[in-house]
Amino acid sequence: MSMRNEQSHRSSSEGKLPRLPPIAAPTSPSSRFDKSHLRTHRRSENMQGLLTNKLYEIALKGKEDTEESLKRRPISAGEPEMPSQMMSTERRIRLNYQFMKKCVQEGPVTPMANEWWDTILTMIPAKLVLSPQLQPHIKELYDEIIAEYDTSIRKAMVQHILVKPKVKGVEGDEDLPDEVLGIDYSSPWRESFNAARESIRQNLHILHPSMQTILGICQSKNYSTMLITDQSNLRTQGSIECEHLKNNVTLDCEKTEEKLMHSWFPEVVNVFIDKDMLKHMSSSQVDAFYNCVSTLISNQLKDLINRTITAWTDLFHKDKSCLPLFKMELILDDDDHMQFYPALGDVEAAVLHVISTVAGTMQHVPTVQSWLAGGNTVTHVDAAVDNDVLLRCTKFLKDAVNFNLQQPIEYLHSFDKYSALVSGESSARVKQFISSENSFENYIQEIEKFRSLAREISSLPTVAHFDMVQLDCDDLKRGLATKANRFADQLLQMLAEEHRTENRR
């Protein structure tokens, strides 16, 4: 270690100035500098003292800060105390319950009565019980029943004697089953039973024979499969106009309603012609009876309307072979706009018109009671379809119509390349061409462009077929071709005018 210090001291002294030798103290005892301050002053000792004082101040300041922070800190809880015993309360309860359960299960059990076994044997055919080959199986059945009886009795003993604690570890044990809620047989019940049966017979009018008669009329072959308007074969009839469809549906609904009111409704009314049928009922019971009749008729009418609406919406499902085929045209209107006729909104309105018309049918069927009364006030049967059903069908049909109209819309966009003929772009180009000086060859080329464009438009298919639309494009084709030929004639007329002017000169 000393060798290392010497080497470091030697290396450090080589890079610095040589240190002066210490001043030797005077040997004379009577020297007047013996007590001089300069003789005893050491700067290292002075700096060491300053550093020590600074450290003391920092330590004192840290101590004061620590004491101040400890004063502001909340008082901590005391040290945790050891429990009085090492076993938790839940564990003691669980172990106690399990021990008591074991004791109860090991208790004596009353054996099963022999009469019970005899009763069980009566449920088995006698020839099987007496068969010698099946005696081992009969013995196995007896042992199994005895074991099941013993297990169930011991389980019932535990459930009735002990209360299962709400602690962990006993979740698998079943609770005591709830008491069966039923008829109280503690007192005689025959009179109350007969009274209840008589009350049901008098007030549950749906069980009256006349109700079965009405239901039989409504479910007969003539009416069970009937639709207010049947459009299932609409596609086989070819393309149809929107207004034609709306008129057909309206007429069908009116004819069906008139037919039902002249055939079905009289049959229903004839069931209640006999006035003696309800003479044993009070006035309140008669009103309740006819309310039941109105409810039954209302359900049958609603079923008829819902069945018709469902049949119409089924035509627009994924099987596109049943879709109605609408006749539409592509036209050039007075403002030179290429558009559909009728408009796409009219197609959607025609489809939805079927639902609204069907839903409005059979809404003026009088109740049987008001019809028999013959008064001026007529009450009608509620045959209105639920609003949720109408909203769901309307949304489905709108989505289906919009989806099936995408193909015609895309086909209309294919004519956008000819839009310059009607947008004014070609007219402006012709005017600019005429105002500038052009040669005869330029005129011929420009005229030929419009002539070829007219021939191209005329060569397009006149009728385009889609899943739900038969699109007639003849009007639009003739309009665009006329526009192209008109521009060509305008250039040709200008060329002839210039040629006459040249000849006059």
Image: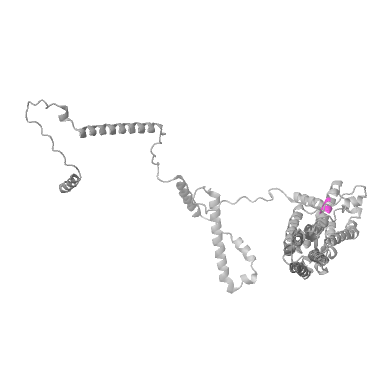
Q: Is residue 35 magenta?
A: no
Q: How many marks?
A: 0
Residue 380 in the image: x percent, y percent?
Answer: 86, 51
**Where residue 387 sits: x, y (%)?**
76, 52
Is 317 situated above or below 91? below
Above or below, 87 against 32 in this view is below
State the residue in front, 225 or 372. 225
Give x and y (percent) for residue 87: 42, 46
Q: Residue at x 58, y 68 (%)?
A: 138
| Color theme of the render | one colour
Asked whether residue 293 is drawn in magenta, I would say yes
Q: Quadrant of the C terminus?
A: bottom right
Position of residue 298 measured from the top left corner of the image (x, y, whole percent)? 82, 54
- Taking 133 as reference, is 263 left or right? right
Q: For the point 12% across and 34% down, which residue is it?
A: 23
Q: Is residue 475 visible?
A: no
The part of the image, by quadrant, that contains residue 253 is bottom right
Magenta part, dominant SS? helix
Q: Which residues are magenta?
A: 291-295
Residue 171 seen by the camera = yes
Q: Residue at x 80, y 62 (%)?
A: 331
